[in-house]
Image (tube, helix red, strand yellow):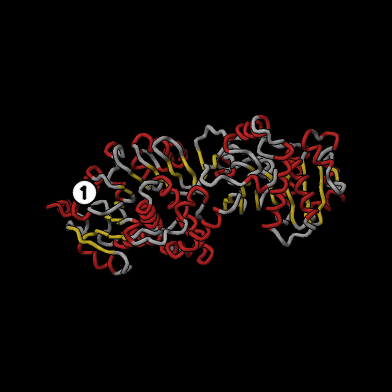
Amino acid sequence: MSLAATRRDRGAAMKIVTREEMREIDRLTSERFQVPSLTLMENAGTSVADFVLSQYPTAKRIGVICGKGNNGGDGFVAARKLLEAGREVRILLLGEPSELQGDAAEMFSRLPVPPQFARSNEELSGEQARTVFEAHLLVDAILGTGFRPPVRGLYAQAIEWLNQRHAPVVAVDIPSGADADVVGEQTGAVARADGVITFTAPRPAHVFGGLGARVTRIAPIGSPQEAMVSTLRLNLITAHEIAPLVGPRPAESNKGSFGHVLVLGGSLGKAGAAAMAGISALRVGAGLSTVATPKSVLVTVAGFHPEVMTEPLEETDAGTISMRALAKGQLDQLVQGKTVLAIGPGISRNPETSEFVRTIVQKSEALLVLDADGLNAFAGLAGELDGKGKSLVITPHPGEMARLAGTTVMAVQRDRINLARNFAREHNLIAVLKGHRTLVAKPDGEVWVNATGNPGMATGGTGDILTGMVAGMLAQNPQRIFEAVMAAVFLHGRAGDVAKETMGEQSLVATDLVGGLPEAFRRARAAADQPYVEIQA
């Protein structure tokens, strides 16, 4: 089977699996679907070589350090492919050739050049082994995701040698010594890695494990979707899932084809939040965007972007939206013809305004996106927040989620996945729990993880941008609600990554994301055409 035959099916979920589930996937692939394990190893090693050549094209002298298991077998294949590509490759086997078994032994026999051997710590410190570690690039093929820490003996010493080198390190499957099932920081002896290339599906550590790699590539090697088994109910959001929502528009399109977003928000001193949500809805492709805001701040909101329409609402003495805005059917008329209501950016915690929010959420049958102080209106009253019979999306940061769930920020961060999952299920809504690896939880308990974005986005207003983007994607895709939310979350992070490249993390501000959206769309479309998936650090 060639690598061309291992392309991912567009739209097929990329499941996050445990180490034991990965073993079962490999077993099913070979036994039920008749893909030889030797073919899987050949494809895996070829993917490693392709990754090295694409990510480090100037590396001429490459050292490949191999363990005795299947990870080492992948390394033997990679070494052979890199030699065929004209690179100078030196191979080090940690052990005796007689200790190799199965596919790894077969791939060892196909090596076109003799490797070096290190059978003890003394030999690892010898001159022949040192020549391997003095390469321009090192490939870590010592231990894979099937390994359970801690690592000891010769392998631990080899990891120490790797960590002392200045050359870039590419890890095959996972940095050696890492626990594939860890969600959080790794402990014990773990090899450093600048790049990671793994296969078929990510394990928890690839997404949450703090491996430190600049880029992690997940490459298909021949396992069919039917072989994928996972009990975690976790999936990775990729460009493949959102591709149908970011492609070219029909030639006969008009602004009415892409929905109308109504943002309810803003208050004295916080007009910018509502304005940012309004323009973000347009930037992701909504046909029309209107911001309804207290009449005293309407001029300020209108001054931000001429493309965003505005509507004045009755206000409290504090310059926030008043319950009087509901009188005489004013808001009912305003809601007519709108595809999505986005409630909360800059709306304030004024008690009367909070009552206004709760009334709208309970009465409205439109698509709803609730964020910021729109969520805080339900602090201590989360029982009233129910999406049954309607489509409701909430986008809390950890503090807002803590107030909704009646717990602490620390408790939220300690168990983000289960908290998001349970809240979405109990309240019949889609929960977008923002933060590093933003989570999108469905009412059925399925959770999707977003791996785009960076710490530069930890600045005021990026949440308001996301609110507008979610609303804008929903306006265009009211029949594909969950995909629209995933697309907005993915593009939001990718726009932040684009902005980081020019602004840096410290200088990045929320509106930089709006400027980064065109390139984010372009990159999403390009990534959807790749057979692999990449997670950037």
Residue at coordinates 32% horizontally, 62% vertically from top-left? 275
Depth order, front residue of 234/249 = 249
Quarter assignment of residue 288: bottom left
Regarding residue 212, the answer to whether it shows in the image is: no
Extreme residue in the left direction? 328
Question: Which is nearer the eye, 321 or 326?
Answer: 326
Residue at image coords 62%, 34%: 25
- The residue at the point 12 percent across, 52 percent down is 328
Residue in view at x 80 percent, y 53 percent: 83
From the top left corner, tell me how far across and down residue 267 is, in percent. 25, 59
Q: Quadrant of residue 27?
A: top right
Residue type at mark 1: give it.
Phe
Element type at mark 1 = helix
From the viewer's perspective, is residue 398 above or below residue 502?
Answer: above
Displayed quadrant of residue 319: bottom left
Q: Is residue 66 left or right of residue 354?
A: right
Residue 535, image x and y in percent? Answer: 57, 51
Instruction: Using the image, determine if residue 288 lies above or below residue 242.
Output: below
* Image height of 3 relative to 26, above or below: below
Given residues 532 and 231, the one toward you in this image is 532
Is disc 1 surrounded by few (<14), some (14 to 19) or many (20+) residues within 10 Å? Answer: some
In this orientation, which residue lies closer to the viewer: 436 or 533? Answer: 533
Q: Position of residue 175 (x, y in %)?
A: 67, 45
Q: Is residue 411 left or right of residue 303?
A: right
Q: How many marks?
A: 1
Residue 90 shows in this picture? yes
Residue named by callout 1: 356
